[in-house]
Amino acid sequence: MNQQLIFNNDFRLTDNQDAVCCSVLQAGLRIAVVIPMPEGWEPHIWLAQIKEDGFFWEEQIEDALAADQLNSDGVLYLDGAA
């Protein structure tokens, strides 16, 4: 667990329910994260799975931030295939 990356526990489905959104804090900066839902998943099941696999996603977010993968709006889009 990275003490410098903190989940805000605000996991939710996007309006069209094709991804999970959440936010993290890194050094006081709030970063929006979007994790697309893989084909064949039900939205509520994908949301529950993201919450359950928090440590996995924390590592994915850390790696993506280290690779400077924020888009121009400051949103981090991850690969949903876990």
Image (cartoon, helix red, strand yellow):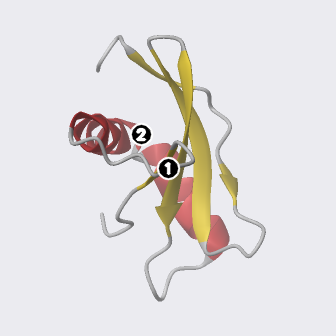
Amino acid type of disc 1? Ser
Q: Which mark is residue 72?
A: 1
Q: Earlier in the sequence, mark 2 or mark 1?
A: 2
Amino acid type of disc 2? Gly
Q: Residue 52's spot in the image, x, y percent? A: 46, 46
Cα–Cα span, label 2 and label 1? 25 Å
Count residues near mark 1 (Cα–Cα under 10 Å), then give few for <14, some for 14-19, many for 20+.
Answer: few
Determine which quarter of the picture holds residue 16. bottom right
User: Which residue extends farthest right?
Assistant: 15
Q: Nearer the viewer, mark 2 or mark 1?
A: 1
User: Which residue extends farthest front?
Assistant: 72
Q: Which mark is residue 54?
A: 2
Q: Which mark is residue 10?
A: none
Determine which quarter of the picture holds residue 59. top left
Residue in the picture at 49% in, 68% down: 36
Q: Residue 37's spot in the image, x, y percent? A: 50, 72
Determine which quarter of the picture holds residue 9. top right
Residue in the picture at 61% in, 27% down: 8
